[in-house]
Amino acid sequence: MTSLRRRLFVLVAAVLVLAGAATGMVLRAADRADRADRPRAGDPAVSGGPVTLGQRDRLAFVNGTPGPHRTAVTTVPAADPEGARTASGLKCARFYAAAGTGVCLRSDPGVLKQRNRALLLDSRLRVQRTFALAGTPSRARVSPSGRFAAWTVFVSGESYASTFFSTRTSILDTRTMRLVPSLEEFAITLDGEPYRAADVNFWGVTFATDDDTFYATLNTAGKTYLVRGSVSGRSVTTLTENVECPSLSPDGTRVAFKKRVLSRTDLWREYVLDLRTLRRTPLAERRSVDDQATWLDDDTLAYALPADGAVGRSDLWTVPADGTGAPRLLLAGASSPAPL
């Protein structure tokens, strides 16, 4: 065999191997999707129907029960979460909404690379703008007025528990469509001093009602901090350590957050921080909560936990925000809650 033929043979063989591997990946993904979409006995009933963000007294969420409406933006009556679920035709990995504005983070699989996008939605879930994402969807939030939307993605790694991970957090002005691609552009004041470092990461934005103030997690030099930020001032200031995925209460006085129990572990406890005194109150939930909790009202928090015996599926739980009471199952097979 000549040298040219030998090289052609190696090239053809390599192409066939890659094609076979790609086909295998697609078939495995299709099989997983097929199994995930098979309804199971005992799951909540879900039916397609009209869903709008202007529906009062309803709770929106991403449906996780198997079937044709898995990952669809879905609503139930807030006063009857075990009632009938109405699913839209919009499917998301992460979702949040406020004041008739929604944000949907999508991750569509491909043969070689998944396509990650953020969709800005109007009150009828119609897509107003689409933004390419640099990584896998992680967190999404909308300000109380609907003026700002924020999202966090994993650029590398798959979770905050990964040894090596990087995040990118963006803020969008939904009126002007001006996008801050990364909060890493903002000026940082850490412990009263200007701070810059190559390892800075932000995640988990939550907005105040003034259409300027926000809170988020800053990670640098192996530590996490709660920061207060200003969109107009393009700056953040650290407030306290060991705070992740903050969520501001409707009255603006407290932040719910997850606190890492031990360094270098993926175990977190849910706490509430009084922003005036910086006093921390541990909540009654004793399991590890890897989520950005949502305030259903000034007294109650909702958050996702992995469902027992169901890989890749979560349930929504609630707990009082003052440290009393006990966790209570809110919705089986659900995530990304947003009270409307």
Image (spheres, helix red, strand yellow):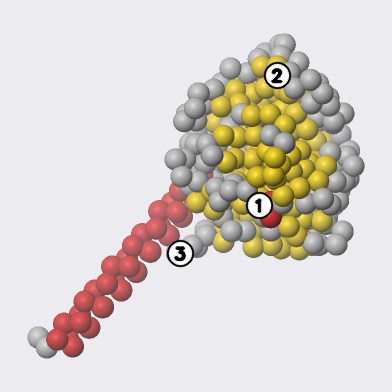
- The crowding category of the residue bearing disc 2, from other C-alpha atoms within 10 Å (few below 14, some 14 to 19, many at least 20), is some
Label for residue 280? 2
Location of mark 3 (residue): 111
Q: Nearer the viewer, residue 213 or 248?
A: 213
Label 2: which secondary element: strand
Observer able to see residue 294: no
Where residue 277 sits in the image (x, y, percent)? 79, 20
Q: Amino acid at mark 1?
A: Glu
Image depth: mark 1 or mark 3 in front: 1
* Foreground label between 1 and 2: 1
Helix, strand or loop at mark 1: helix
| Residue 108 visible in the shown view | yes
The CA distance from mark 1 to mark 2 is: 27 Å
Separation of disc 3 and disc 2 at Cα? 46 Å
Choose top left, top right, bottom left or bottom right for residue 269: top right
In this figure, which residue is indicated by the disc labeled 1? 184
Mark closest to the chain's N terminus, 1 or 3: 3
Asked whether, in this view, residue 159 is left or right of residue 180, the answer is left
Q: Nearer the viewer, residue 177 or 108?
A: 177
Q: Is residue 139 above or below residue 76?
A: below
